[in-house]
Amino acid sequence: MRYELYYWPSIQGRGEFVRLALEAAGAAYVDVARRPAKHGGVPALLKLLNGRALKHPPFSPPILKAGKLIIAQTANILFYLGGRHRLAPKDEAGRLWVHQLQLTLADFLGEIHDTHHPIAGSLYYEEQKKEAARRAATFVRERAPKYLGYFERVLARNHSNKHLVGKSLSYADLSLFQVVAGLHYAFPRMMRRLGKKHPRVMALHDAVARRPKIAAYLASRRRIPFNQQGIFRRYPELDR
Amino acid sequence: MRYELYYWPSIQGRGEFVRLALEAAGAAYVDVARRPAKHGGVPALLKLLNGRALKHPPFSPPILKAGKLIIAQTANILFYLGGRHRLAPKDEAGRLWVHQLQLTLADFLGEIHDTHHPIAGSLYYEEQKKEAARRAATFVRERAPKYLGYFERVLARNHSNKHLVGKSLSYADLSLFQVVAGLHYAFPRMMRRLGKKHPRVMALHDAVARRPKIAAYLASRRRIPFNQQGIFRRYPELDR
């Protein structure tokens, strides 16, 4: 089966967490909205989002088509893929634990997004710069250390020390990699300081980046570069 | 087995979504932090949050102890309870769909919270009133109609029309009930207008409230009243 991923074509965004899982699994997939319009493109994404015939309409992308299944919500898609591609433990306790970590990463990601959009996603950054400065200050001072400290603790308590869960790669590892990579891009100054305090988190980021399938993906055109339209944006005035 | 729920004792908050599922299921549970300190209380919650021996530390409450399992993240707890207490379909497609709806409700809830706390959870509302007014305006005008419209559409496309998923109660129905109840409390003016436009959502709210187990719960002391410390707060200046 070839998966179909539907996500905005110009940003990593939340779709990137799904791409990383598909790439790590070596799964066959089409990144539909990145294809030319005659083979999909954004029209295909919009059709799926607005389709009136869909019994289970998604609220927003990313959306994964897996055979007859149409699954939305990043963590939900990863839960599904994790069970199919050995990116999560098989036992119930392990599956719930990986999912719990993923949902905590989703909360972290929401707060990262809101550093530059604290008022409304429908407004430009320039229209909420003042509020963003205030929100980002708290993020840098309180929230980022709290989340990174949490994941450092989880790694320290796992015997393997190299993965969040057990002895092998899970989708939560991939997602933590992505969040750390994004923070390096968006908050380089903060990360120079926080990186030293969270050596296990940084080591996990580096180890994931070195995995052959992930390294090949990151070097490929399939990886959209970080940019100023995504969740992670580099505004030096927010990185103090 | 008697479940143990750990959540802040003075607010409904995210714990309420778990309480509603436990109540609808008729499950035996202890609301640990609401007991006197000698039988639990907040010290027991803090111990669980800060416990250094815990292999799977939670980031924040609610936390559910189910035998040896310690589960955090609201949607994750509901996924677990849904499978055990017939609050979700048994087949994979159905379980993923209910979870997808729950995660969308979690996004909605996050935006509701941020109407009064757009800058930082660690600051008082009074310290971010100006920003809150701006954020709430967008919420009332764009976001609330978008989310309510979405759930109205999901109900319209489900044959039963009375539940979000299939023909019986799921944890997503309970959560949608709670969100609508909270919006009635926090944004009565907005809801007078939006209620009329979303009759199926309002009917689901009413039907859940009338279910014998839920009605008994809502009338009991176990239900903490809405108040100005929770996620749903009534600030008339935000409800325009």
Image: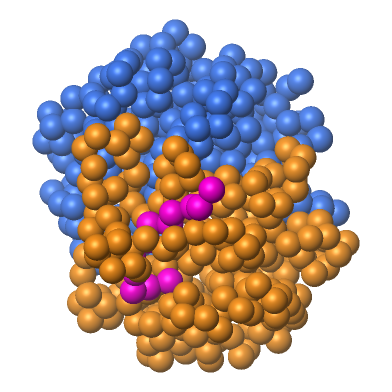
Chain colours: A orange, B blue
Residue B63 position in % (x across, y down) = 65, 41
Return the residue nearer the eye: A213 or B191: A213
Q: Is residue B12 visible?
A: no
Residue B25 position in % (x across, y down) = 57, 17
Q: Does the magenta run of residues contain A5? A: yes
Query: Would residue B64 appear left or right of A224 to someone viewing this image?
Result: right
- Residue in view at x 21 percent, y 70 percent: A123
Q: Is residue A149 visible?
A: yes
Main SS category, magenta section: loop
The part of the image, by quadrant, that contains residue A133 is: bottom left
Position of residue B27 relative to residue B60, above or below, is: above
Q: Residue furthest top?
A: B212
The part of the image, by quadrant, that contains residue A20 is: bottom right
Q: Does the magenta run of residues contain A214? A: no
Query: Would residue A187 appear left or right of A132 to someone viewing this image?
Result: right
Question: Which residues fall within the magenta stretch?
Answer: A1-12
